[in-house]
Image: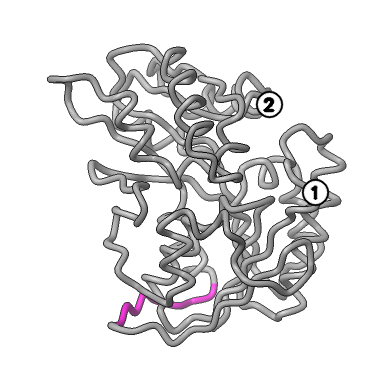
Amino acid sequence: MKIALMDSGTGLLAAAAVMRRLRPDADLVLSSDPDGMPWGPRTPEDVTAHALAVARSAAAHHPDALIVACNTASVHALPALRAALEPGIPVIGTVPAIKPAAAGGGPVAIWATPATTGSPYQRDLIERFGRGVEVTGVPCPGLADAVQAADEAAIDDAIAAAAARTPRGLRSVVLGCTHYELVAERIRAALQQPGAPALVLYGSAEAVAAQALRRIGAEPAPAAAPTGALSVLLSGRPAGLPAEALAFAEGRLLAEGRTDLAPGAPAGGSARADGVAAAVRR
């Protein structure tokens, strides 16, 4: 079994680490675009062109499924990716987990990139799945870039700035960018109020990994030791995991061939110990 994951950068690490836990025997292909990132400021047409190039690099390795572990690419490029690759390669997209967060009750905040916050796409999701719950979009300028660069000070500054724009008394927060899942526990620490119920963070890694297995008719089969190979493509070039990826425990887990990733509690401070759910685009 071979599963490919694509993103502009390191945002794919969370889903890849979950997939390693669910199927240690699966070969993983991680395809990203350091030469072309960030994708967020690009036009939809430009995002689609870059996403297709990254996907085709992954498809050349003949995976059984491709996970689009990127909210921006899922929003703008998913139809083009499916037209190019399906039915030969099932393509699984990612959307912010507004539906399960709203189902859990409000108030809810959605942390996302400035381009996504307030976009017609996000407004439509809120209107369709908000179910009368109070939902606040919180733009997080610089956070994805800081995570991509593994810049600890910039990550802290971006989280603090976004936390200052986030309403008090939240029940849950939707992580609307896959990069944010790598620093989810730091986000939780910035938002959790003393004496308040534990804040629930909603990400995508668990759901998209599980959906990829369902699409190819496979079941989770965790084992003590991984046997699957890891291939890395950086703007189409074979490479090792970049240093930025190794700054996060998910990246180190993949590089070291480990599987010690507890369900619902991804490694490296991105644990969603109080609950996680996600949305996928089939």
Neighbours of disc 2 within 10 Å: few (<14), some (14-19), many (20+): some
Q: Position of residue 277 (x, y in %)?
A: 37, 45
Identify which amino acid the numbered label 1 is placed on.
Gly
Q: Which residue does the numbered mark 1 point to in the structure image?
A: 36
Which quarter of the picture shows residue 52?
A: bottom right
Which residue sits furthest bottom?
A: 227
Q: Position of residue 137 (x, y in %)?
A: 51, 19
Q: Could you tell me which residue is drawn at 30 percent across and 45 percent down?
A: 272
- Please tell me whether residue 267 is drawn above or below residue 241 in the rendered image: above
Which residue sits furthest left?
A: 195
Q: Secondary structure at mark 1?
A: loop
Q: CA distance from mark 1 to mark 2?
A: 17 Å
Q: Secondary structure at mark 2?
A: loop
Please name which of the two marks, 1 or 2, marks the residue nearer to the observer.
Answer: 1
Q: Which residue does the numbered mark 2 point to in the structure image?
A: 115
Apparent side of residue 243 relative to residue 49 in the rendered image (left or right):
left
State yes or no: discs 1 and 2 in contact (Cβ < 8 Å).
no
Apparent side of residue 25 relative to residue 259 in the rendered image (left or right):
right
Q: How is the image coloured?
A: one colour
The disc at residue 273 is none
Which quarter of the picture shows residue 227?
A: bottom left
In this view, the residue in front, 104 or 13, is 13
Q: Could you tell me which residue is drawn at 82 percent across and 52 percent down?
A: 50
In this view, the residue in front, 21 or 79, is 21
Neighbours of disc 1 within 10 Å: few (<14), some (14-19), many (20+): some
Q: Could you tell me which residue is drawn at 54 percent across and 57 percent down?
A: 245
Apparent side of residue 22 relative to residue 112 in the rendered image (left or right):
left
In the image, the segment drawn in magenta is 216-223
Q: Could you tell me which residue is drawn at 52 percent across and 38 percent down?
A: 96
